[in-house]
Structure formats: C-alpha cells, structure tokens
Image (tube, helix red, strand yellow):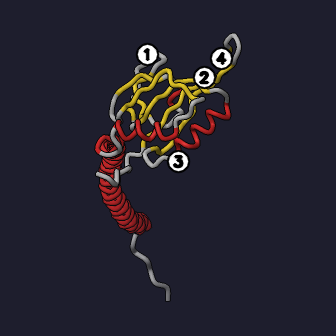
Amino acid sequence: MYELDLIPASYKERLKIKRWCHQFALVLAGLLIVVFSLKFAILNKTTVLNSKIAVLQRDKQTSIEQQQKYDALVSQETKLRNQLEILNGLRGGPSAKQILLAVDRVMQNDIWFTQWSFIRAGEITQVQPATVQTGYFIIIPQETNASPNQQAWKLDTHMEISGQALDHSSLSGFISNLIKQPEINDVKVINTSLRSYTSSQVVEFKLVVIINNQFKDEHV
C-alpha cells in the first residue's frame, strides 16, 4: 500500500530555507560575539600597554633628571675639592723667613739670583699655556677668542726664582741641595739657556720652588 504525501513541495522548500536562515543567524551571532570579545580583549590590552608606556616614560624622564642632578653634584664637588685644596695650602706651610733661611743654607758662590718672588696659594695670576704643564695651577676656563694667557689659581705656595749659574753642574747641585730641605716639596726647572759675556759664559735659569705646606717648625 502506498502512502500519499499531501505536503506540497513548495512548502517543504520554504521550511528548508527557514532552517538554513535560522542556522545562518546562529552562526552569524556566534561570529559577532567572538569578534566583539576579541575587540574588547585587544582594547583592554592596548589600555594596559599604554599605561605601562606612560609609566616607563615618566621613569625615563625621572632618570634623566636624576642623571643631570648627579652630574651637577659631581661638578660642584670637584670645584669644592679644588677650593679646599687651595684653602689647605693657605693655612699651613713655613713662613717667608723660614724659606729664606732654607735657601741660604744651600746657597753657593757660583749661583746668582736676578729675580725672586714668594707667592702664597690661592692667588689668581696670568699664565702661559706652557707654564700650565708645571702642575701647580688650577686653570680657569676662558672665553672664546680670549688672550693666549690664561687665568689660573695658584695651587701651591711657591717661589719663582730667576738667576744665573756658573755652569750646569753648579745649577744641578744647587737644585739637588734645595730639594733636600724639609721646607721644600719640589723644584721644577722652567727653562735654562746659555748667556755669553766678553770673557765667560753662564747659565741663565728660571725655577719654580714648591713649598712643603705640611712643614712644621720644631722650634715653634
């Protein structure tokens, strides 16, 4: 016996299309949910990263400011150390009379002084670039196109002596004996040259005698 299908084919087709539409709507809704979820997650992650970037930028700026403050403090410390060294030089050391006695102890008949100056530390003077190499000056920075002479703090109490010696051996002996004196810290030869006279020849010299600022007279 045959069963008769009384449902029209067109109706069945409409039901099939309706089911497809319903399934498509469900799939689309699912996709939209996934897309919005991803978008929310990305926006949230972006916000977090932006916050971290802002913090890092603030930290970087703080680090730069701290480095600048540190550099300024180091520069200030260097200046204060130089000033302290100068002040320590001003406070101690032998008197001019003691220095004269020290020189007199080693003075020889074959040595003559033509110029002699005694200078305490802490004074400002003009120096030639070559003189700077002697090591008893603190150079003051000069402006562009300034004079070839430079201003400098005298770092050590010292004497500047110009004179003549009978020969180089006499000058060498005088310097060696002078360095041995407790009032003297060092002797630096700035320059020497030969000077001829009618019947003789002498050695002209210029010395810097650095005073021992730690010297204490035992008789005081």
Q: Amino acid at mark 2?
A: Glu
Q: Mark 1 Cα within 10 Å, few/some/many (few <14, many 20+)?
A: few
Crowd band around label 3 with a 10 angstrom C-alpha radius: few (<14), some (14–19), many (20+): few
The circle on residue 204 is: 2
Callout 4–callout 2 Cβ contact below 8 Å: yes
Give the CA distance from mark 1 to mark 4: 34 Å
At 41% from the left edge and 63% from the top edge, which residue is drawn? 17
Q: Quadrant of residue 39?
A: bottom left
Q: Height in image: 218 above or below 101?
A: below
Of label 3 and label 4, which has the lower sequence position? Answer: 3
As drawn, is 178 to the left or to the right of 18? right
Q: Residue furthest top?
A: 198
Query: 45 above or below 23?
Result: above
The dot on residue 146 is: 1
Query: The disc labelled 3 sits on which kind of residue?
Result: Lys
Label 2, label 3: how many angstroms apart (C-alpha)?
Answer: 22 Å
Q: Three-letter amino acid code at disc 4?
A: Arg
